[in-house]
Image: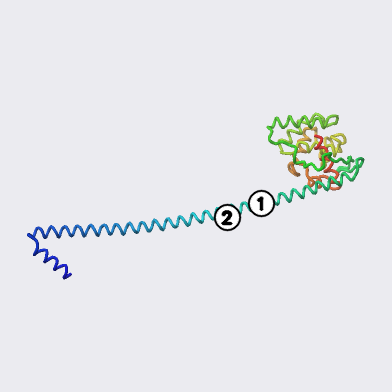
Amino acid sequence: MQQDSMGLLDLLVSSDSLEDVIEYVQYSNAISYRSEREISELLEASKELAAAQSDLEARRDDATKARQDAENALNEAEAARTAEQNAYMAKQAALAEQEKAALEEAARAGTDATFQTENGNDSLVRTPTSGAVPAIFGVNWNMGREEFISHWAARIDAFLSGFPLAGHGRTFAEAAYDHGVDPRLSPAISNVESTRGTYCFLPYNAWGWGHMSWPDWDTAIRAHIAGLAAGYAPYLTVATANKYCPPNAAYWYATVLWGIEHI
């Protein structure tokens, strides 16, 4: 403070006039005010920079966590997919073994062997010539509806030719397409259960199915295929054979597969 006072006295002594002193003091005050303002702005900018840096670090941490979460989710999804694929492959392998065992049992029965179906009819044991052919294959579901129906109606009619169900291939194909069922399955079952409609234990029941009867073939066909879709697999499986004809499931499976192969 004393030093400031001495400086002011020196200024008064050395100045030519009071106006010079006042002008100098005003200039000094302006410089001081400007410096204080700039320092204040600098401090404020420093605070803003620190806040921005803190926000950036927080965003970076969030991004790192999000990336890690995404990687973890991807790893979990891949692990789940691998587990699902392994389970599917194991299931398919088990099904293949069941199919193989059923066909081998049927083959051991011999060409003249017969078996009794669930409704009491006798059927020849048949085995497909191509061996264990997965029944899931052989149907192209990428066709349009009319193309699908025309294609399978002709093949089914050829299989049923000369039997009571002859001429109803289109009904089989339409119902199969509408319910997503292998179009060969119902005709092949009719071959086992009633020799394609020849020996029906109830009116128009060519499939040995429960205690059902129908007024005509078309109604019966649509009902049977709808029932397959609702209560069985959409294609032939050993599980279907076990459910449909428990006493002789292996023979039934092999003989239905033989029919599928010939449609």
Residue that numbered label 2 is attached to: 72
Q: Give the quarter of the figure containing the C terminus.
A: top right
At label 2, counting other C-alpha atoms closer than 10 Å, the crowd grade (few under 14, some 14-19, many 20 or more) is: few
Please, what secondary structure does the residue beneath circle 1 have? helix
220 horizontally vs 2: left or right:
right
Asked which quadrant contains residue 251, the reply is top right
In x, y percent, where is residue 31?
20, 58
Q: Do the residues labelled 2 and 1 touch (CB within 8 Å)?
A: no
- The residue shown at (80%, 33%) is 217
The alpha-carbon separation of the residues under discs 2 and 1 comes to 15 Å
Q: What residue is drawn where x is 80% and y is 29%?
A: 167
Residue 228 visible within the image: no
Kind of residue sitting beneath label 1: Thr
In which quarter of the view is residue 236 placed?
top right
- Where residue 57 appears, as percent x and y from the top left, is 44, 57
Q: Can residue 64 be seen in this view?
A: yes
First reached walking from the N terminus: tag 2 or tag 1: 2
Whole-percent x and y of residue 134?
Answer: 77, 42
Q: Is residue 171 above or below residue 1?
A: above
Q: Is residue 31 left or right of residue 197?
A: left
**Residue beneath label 1, please?**
82
